[in-house]
Amino acid sequence: MKNVLRIVKYLVFIGFLIIIFIEVDVIIFGIKSKPSESDCIIVLGCQVKGIYPSPFLQARLNDGIRLYKEGYGKYIIVSGGKGAGEDITEAVAMKNFLLDKGIDKNKIVMEDQSRNTMENLDFSKKVMEGKGFKTAVVVSNKYHLKRVSLMSKRLKMNTSYYGVFVSQYRFTEYKGYVREVLGVLKFLVLKK
């Protein structure tokens, strides 16, 4: 019985170390990520309130606009389908937001079928291939970027990353960092 308890203690300790390692990796990756000049900027979808982007999605879009204006991409791909409680797709809400901010409609490319991060990237890659784009800057929240990078590598995408942190919703951002450990673990195990 003592041996079984000792093994359980070691397994719990190892599990705890793995969680800490992943959390630190998620935090450091989000801090160190820098965009590279690319063919396009992919703004990953996030919750839409009716027809309006949530504050988190607005932050992603505002930084996507800034990166576009600074020359990090010639086009902006808005990626996101219609989720529960959303009146329109995330892509349509994002396109409308960009148009309201003065972005040329010919520079906005929509991907409006995805339902999760892996599909955001996979479907955006197909859009890129159709347009002849080879490189992209992916914009999401800082806590999300490590998993996004793992998925991009799996899809063999040539991407750099830019992360936002919405300080007005600091507590929600911190919850995202905690929750993301499970997202990374799930991806490492299930590859999706």
Image: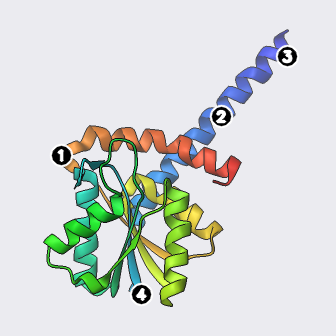
Residue 167 can be seen, yes or no: yes
Q: Earlier in the sequence, mark 4 or mark 3?
A: 3
Residue 158 can be seen, yes or no: no
The residue located at (82%, 11%) in the rendering is 2
Tag 4 residue: 39
Of helix, strand and loop, which one carries label 3? helix
Q: At which x and y percent is residue 162?
A: 37, 68
Q: Earlier in the sequence, mark 1 or mark 2?
A: 2
Q: Earlier in the sequence, mark 3 or mark 2?
A: 3
Identify the mark at residue 15; answer none if there is no mark.
2
Q: Earlier in the sequence, mark 1 or mark 4?
A: 4
* Amino acid carrying mark 4 in the image: Asp
* Amino acid carrying mark 2 in the image: Gly
Q: At which x and y percent is residue 191?
A: 67, 54
Q: Nearer the viewer, residue 49 or 156?
A: 49
* Amino acid carrying mark 3 in the image: Asn
* Amino acid carrying mark 1 in the image: Gln
The residue located at (49%, 54%) in the rendering is 115
Determine the CA span between mark 1 and mark 4.
Answer: 31 Å
**Is the residue marked by circle 2 packed among few (<14), some (14-19), or many (20+) residues within 10 Å?**
few
Tag 3 residue: 3
**Is the residue marked by circle 4 packed among few (<14), some (14-19), or many (20+) residues within 10 Å?**
some
